[in-house]
Image (cartoon, helix red, strand yellow):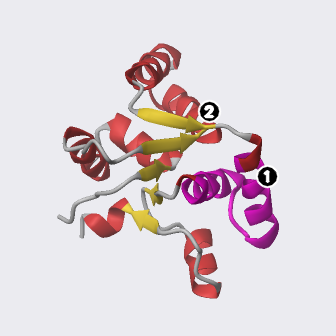
Amino acid sequence: MKELRGSVTFDSSALIEYLAGTDLGLVVKEYFENLKLEERVYCSLYAVSETFYVLCRMKGLEHARDDMDRILRSRVIEIGSTAEMALEAGRIKCERAISIADCSCIATAKLTNSQAVFAQKEKELKEEIERKVFDTNLVFLSDLTS
């Protein structure tokens, strides 16, 4: 298994894998366990909402609230929530056929000079990468486990 290193911006898909304790989530767990002082961890405000609602549907409201409270209180993840990030996400969405959540992750990564980390390469992202490479590094947990 390859290792995730450097500063990262987690998409909700990567956070959900981590919180659900899946095999892909183990990559994130190891990243957190070996986090270096110079490495920064981000996620978009949109990813917080999406992670919460998916966990809520999977495991219930109380479980989702507990998991998200634990992550947010740890202060390990910085939440990207500036107007500049929102505008950059909108610009990416204007140019690309991907979800606003993915755009938000990529915009946060771009503005924080970090890597955008997704659980796996979904169809829309794959098609957009093939059409035109992003100017931000995209990492897929599924690529690190194969």
* Residue 81 placement (x, y as % from top left): 66, 37
| Mark 2: amino acid | Ser
Which residue is denoted by mark 1 in the rendering? Answer: 87
Name which residue type carries label 1.
Leu
Q: Nearer the viewer, residue 76 or 55?
A: 76
Horizontally, is 117 left or right of 35 in the view?
right
Image quadrant holding the C terminus, namely: bottom left
State if disc 2 and disc 1 touch (CB < 8 Å): no
Q: Position of residue 59 (x, y in %)?
A: 44, 25
Image position of 80 (left or right of 114): right
For the residue pair 141 and 53, the one nearer the viewer reads as: 141
Q: CA distance from mark 1 to mark 2?
A: 18 Å
Residue 138 image point, x, y percent:
48, 67
Q: Nearer the viewer, mark 1 or mark 2?
A: 1
Q: Is residue 98 above or below residue 9?
A: below
At 26% from the left edge and 47% from the top edge, which residue is drawn? 31
**Would you say 67 lies left or right of 133 here?**
left
Residue at horizontal 24 percent and vertical 45 percent from the top: 36
N-terminal of the pair, mark 1 or mark 2, is 2
Q: Secondary structure at mark 1?
A: helix
Q: Is residue 94 magenta?
A: yes
State the quadrant of the N terminus: bottom left
Residues 28 and 115: in front is: 115
Which residue is denoted by mark 2 in the rendering?
49
| 10 Å crowding of disc 1: few (<14), some (14-19), many (20+) | few
Residue 140 is labelled as none
Write down the quadrant of residue 41 in the picture: top left
**Start-end of magenta stretch:** 85-111
Asked whether 20 falls inside the magenta stretch, the response is no
The residue sitting at 82% across, 66% down in the picture is 94
